[in-house]
Each structure stands twice: as structure tokens, then as C-alpha cells.
Amino acid sequence: MRVVLAEDLFLLRQGIIQLLEAYDVEVVAAVDNGTDLAAAITEHRPDIAIVDVRLPPTFTTEGLQAALRARREQPGLPILVLSQHVEQMYARELLADGTGGIGYLLKDSVLDDEQFIDAVRRVAAGGTAMDTAVVAQLMTSHSRDEPLAALTAREREVLELMAEGCSNTAIAQRLTITEGAAAKHISNIFTKLMLPPSSDSNRRVLAVLAYLNA
């Protein structure tokens, strides 16, 4: 796996590089600003870009905006966002095209290396890895939108866990239900969101994006 990393804090950037390389992930470029991020993505065409939201020179949403520009130039580019904050407007724009893996983790919520590496691999493979706090904020003002209104309370719980990247087994464990029940809820979600038949992983991503973009 080839990664382009954008993080302005030197020690954190070096720490992430060492962590990735310890798991045989190649960091082809590590930059500290949005301009260099865009150039590195164009040059290396990585398997995934790991991006801090706030980069020089503005320290506002420079990194996320650079990621959005890169994704327009390289459709489907998997992007894992790392941040101290949830930037709702740009996060929704990043989710809007419905293609490629997407992750949004809050730095304070990453508690161990396996959690982080699992998220990197999942997003690079085209899946999702959303922090629970990010999911909650993105969902706040969209609880009544169609066709999401057709979902039951339990189906919404299942879909929220899908957004976090949970497997059927993990969903069953978190909700204390059987795997069969989890699979049935997911099938109902696909039907109610009118997702066309395709691979299960693709439908899961489409369901999550429909939920978060509604």
C-alpha cells in the first residue's frame, strides 16, 4: 500500500510514518501543507491519502480542501481524514460523490496502532472508517430526511455502526443481537435505500454515504 501523508506537526508526522512503515505500508510522500499535498498526490497517485484538516497557511480547512481538489482530479482516491475537529461542510462535500473509500477519525479517539492501521486498510480498500463523534455530528440535522425516514430506529443504529466500518459480527456484538439479525437489518436497509444489486461491500459504502449525505 502506498500512502501520501499530510500533517503539519513534525513529531506527529514522523510518528505516523514510523507506525505505517512498521506495518509494511509505504509512505511515498509526507508533507506539511495543502499545496505540497496536491502535488504529491498528482505525482505519486497513492492508494490512499491521509490528511490533517488544518494545514498551513490558513490552519482552517486547508488540508481537507486540498483533498477535495485531489479527488476531483483523481476520482475515487481513498482519503482518510485526521482531525481534532469535525468540519461538517467540507466533510459532506468529501462524501458527496459516493466513490472511493472515506474515513474521518478524530485524533483523540485513536487509541492504538491496530485501530489506526485497520482504518487505513479499510479505507484504502474502498470502505469507510468514521469516528462515532463524526457520525453523530453529521447526522444531527438530518434525522427526518427521505428515504431515511423509512428506516426503523434499530436500522439506523445498524447503519451508524456500518458507517464506523463495523462488520456484521461486530454489529451483532455491539447491539447484542445475532449475526443473522444483523444481516437481515442490513438487507432491509439496502432495500429501503433502493440500492441496486452489487457487491456487498459496495452497497455498504453507498448506504453509508446516502445516510451521511441526506
Image (cartoon, rainbow, N blue to C red):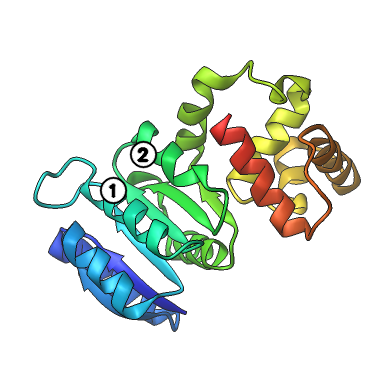
Q: Which residue is drawn at 63% across and 37% down?
A: 210
- Left or right of residue 153, residue 89 in this image: left
* Label 2: which secondary element: helix
Helix, strand, or loop for circle 1? helix
Q: Answer with the quarter of the image where residue 2 lies.
A: bottom left
Find disc 2 in the rendering and name its residue.
90
> Tag 2: Cα neighbours inside 10 Å, few (<14), some, or many (≥20)?
some
Earlier residue among tags 1 and 2: 1
In this view, the residue farthest toward the left is 57
Residue 43 image point, x, y percent? 29, 78
Residue 178 is left or right of residue 161, and the answer is right
The amino acid type found where label 2 is placed reads Tyr
Q: Position of residue 128 (x, y in %)?
A: 57, 53
Q: Badge 1 is on which residue?
A: 65
Label 1, residues with CA under 10 Å away: few <14, some 14-19, many ≥20: many
Q: State the residue in front, 77 or 119.
A: 77
Spatial CA span between label 1 and label 2: 7 Å
